[in-house]
Amino acid sequence: DPTKMAALRVIQKLARTVPPRCLSVSWMSSHASAKSAGHPVSEVVMPLTVLSEDEQMMRDTVAKFAKEKIGPLVREMDQNSKMDDSVLQGLFENGLMGVEVEAEYGGTDSTFFSSCLVVEELARVDPSVAVLVDIQNTLIVTSLRLHGTEEQKQKYLPRLAADTIGSFCLSETESGSDAFALRTRADKKGDYWVINGSKMWISNSEQAGLFLVFANADSSQGYKGISTFLVDRDTPGLTIDKHEDKLGIRASSTCPVHFEDVKIPESNLLGTLGHGYKYAIGLLNEGRIGIAAQMVGLAQGCFDYVVPYTMERKQFGQSIFNFQAMQHQISDVATEIEAARLLVYNAARLREAGRPFIKQAAMAKYYAAEVAAKTTAKSLEWMGGVGFTKDYPVEKFYRDCKIGAIYEGTNNIQLSTIARYLKQEWQQ
């Protein structure tokens, strides 16, 4: 039927740009569903977890890479608090450090949702690797794509996609949740900016070649004086202190970064002067969806390891999985992981569709962090004494998950954000 074939070609073309939940990959199934519901094909809404062909391919590729190349190194990287160079190289070679970077700049030219899938899959094996990739894609790359000049994009995006790691420099000793209390300043000297100050808890800093720095260029304006600057690693005056000895995500470098009379050209101002606070808010609103994806992946990875153990481990003459109390606990955790994943996917799809997503992103991050904490704690208990040892990966997942309730907005900050939006909705 020529009409059906023409429609199929249109759907196949649209499927590469429209989220898969909006269009069925199969014309026949979408046509049947639409016809039975009395709607045209284009209005068929698919489940959140149905992936497009490209998204499924991305997930499968990352899962294979994580299992084969990262898995064997996880324990060693955790013990040494250092990311293996082969892992970093593999991330770039597989196009995972520039997921949304356009093809013209040498990137993968994919989507925000795909970047969340990448983070989720990596976190199932090692959350430390996942957060490195999340920061690169949802914060550093996004900031340049949204606010960079064409010259800045041509200079930095190809590097970020090929061999350069980015670092997001916002937090300071006195500005954590109150991020806009930062004291780092940028003073204009002719056609240069001179940056002075120190940043704390800066992820990716040991390996970073580019630093996205938030500094106040006009303290008389308060937080409205905050601006964003691009600083290359080899800029004189930039120094990186020794990495923190952390509880979890130990292979992810976290260091203080100091700026002493760091001189950069005025062309390294990112976006509009005085709009840094807006950029930070916007980037973190999106970035927390990535962290939520990390927590879902972490929970799933831990769960996937432990459940088979409960089926093999025997006590009182039977598998411990066969005890009803165990089945109820395992089913409860499985349900919460699935609920967290749906929150994450919904927030990511909303962001990708250009619809309001801030409340949903806060809900996703808050709930995913809670679920990760519950999943790892229960998993450790289900494994008994062996779960408490470093011979099994559960204790690492248990340590890694705690950061989810802290960085890119604490759980209380997420709850306050949710409450603010609920109040606005009820007052309309």
Image (tube, rainbow, N blue to C red):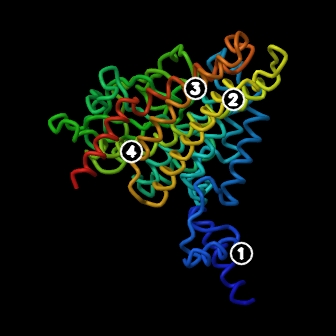
Is residue 235 shown left or right of residue 108? left
Q: Which residue is drawn at the image coordinates 14% and 36% (left, top)?
A: 220
**Residue positioned most to the bottom:** 2
Q: Secondary structure at mark 3?
A: loop
Q: Secondary structure at mark 1?
A: helix
Q: Real-space Cα distance between discs 1 and 4? A: 52 Å
Q: Where does residue 111 sit, x and y in percent of width and height?
A: 57, 55
Q: Is residue 205 above or below residue 280?
A: above
Q: Secondary structure at mark 2?
A: helix
- Residue type for callout 1: Met
Instruction: Write down the residue under mark 2.
Output: 327
Mark 4 residue crowding within 10 angstroms, few (<14) / some (14–19) / many (20+): some
**Mark 1 or 4: the one toward you:** 1
**Mark 3 or 4: the one toward you:** 3
Q: Where does residue 52 sit, x and y in percent of width and height?
A: 66, 60
Q: Real-space Cα distance between discs 2 and 1? A: 39 Å
Q: Which mark is residue 28?
A: 1
Instruction: Write down the residue under mark 3.
Output: 252
Q: Where does residue 324 sit, x and y in percent of width and height?
A: 70, 26
**Residue positioned most to the left:** 220
Q: Secondary structure at mark 4?
A: helix
